[in-house]
Amino acid sequence: MPEPSVAPGRTDGEPRTGTGGRGTPRKAALLAAVFAVSYGLVLSIYSDTFFWFAIPGLLGLVTVVLLAVHLVLRRPFGGGGVPFATDGSDRQGPVKHHYTVLTRRYLLIVVPGVAMTVLPLLLGIGYLNPFIGVGLMLLSLGTRFWLPQIGWSWRSARVLKVYDFEFRSPVQKSNLQSLGRRSLTLGAEGSPRMAAREPLFSDQWPQEIARGVWFAGDEPFGGVILVPDTGELMFTQPANWSVQERARQQAGAERQEKAARAGLARKV
């Protein structure tokens, strides 16, 4: 296995490209303030004169819920490192950690969502009834946004059951889009440009990714990237799937069967 150009197995973490989670407390405080104001406006529905203020209040609550779900679910790992080796020797640790992080984040949505839905019904206080709608919306949107993240983690886990990691360097970053989508090229000239999907749906590049990554897979079919130090996984397949069709056909029965077991035989 080729030697990496970064210190293998480091888990102390380094700053990422972008702001990371440094602005999260400020954003959370702002959302809480907007929620309080919006909820107060919604309560005007009980007024015979100012009931129409409930409309902007309702819009404010919807906006807060959407932004809160995004803030909780779609962000990179926090600082402090990851609890597994990032030197390509551990294929299960990254997957388990992604599942753990996503489950914890989902619970941050489910617990308050259930509480806001159930408590007003149990207490029977009319002024708390708007919380029921907020709780149901939080649960539905949170689940809707969370399930695709679990799906990409599952696809990554399936690949890592079949392939071992190999180090690829350098990494050329092409573009960065929403929902964890990005494009990159692994290794020397001639390698296909890969479309990658990060399960955390972060909108940032790990800072040291250009120095090299661990790749498990078969490039004409796709694979999984593990970023040294910071530990992010990315599910990848050729950005131009049809261009690699001939390479896949010439890969041989053994490579094709291996790709099929890893869920890489078709474009995802």
Image (cartoon, grey):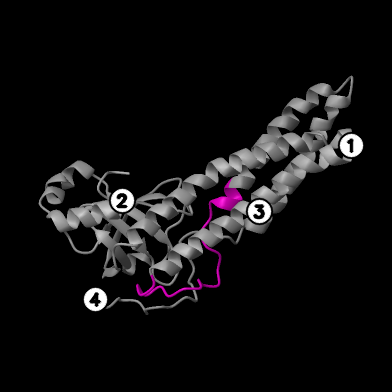
Q: Residue at x 14, y 54 (%)?
A: 253
Mark 4 or mark 2, which is nearer the start of the sequence?
4
Q: CA distance from mark 4 to mark 1?
A: 65 Å
Image quadrant occupied by the C terminus: top left
Is 83 magenta? The answer is: yes
Q: Which residue is mark 4?
A: 2
Residue 115 visible here: yes
Amino acid type assigned to the residue bearing label 4 in the image: Pro
Left or right, 95 with reference to 19: left
Q: Nearer the viewer, residue 231 or 6?
A: 231
Residue 19 visible here: no
Q: Residue at x 41, y 78 (%)?
A: 9
Q: Nearer the viewer, mark 2 or mark 3?
A: 2
Left or right, 258 with reference to 208: left
| CB contact under 8 Å: marks 2 and 4 | no
Mark 1 or mark 3, which is nearer the start of the sequence?
3
Q: Which residue is mark 3?
A: 108
Q: Main secondary structure of the magenta part?
A: loop
Residue pushed farthest left? Answer: 250
Q: Which residue is mark 1?
A: 125
Q: Residue at x 34, y 62 (%)?
A: 161
Q: CA distance from mark 3 to mark 1?
A: 25 Å
Q: CA distance from mark 2 to mark 3?
A: 31 Å
Q: Please, what secondary structure does the residue beneath circle 3 have?
A: helix
Left or right, 223 with reference to 146: left
- Classed neighbour count for the residue bearing mark 3: other residues with Cα under 10 Å, few (<14), some (14–19), many (≥20): some
Amino acid type assigned to the residue bearing label 2 in the image: Gly
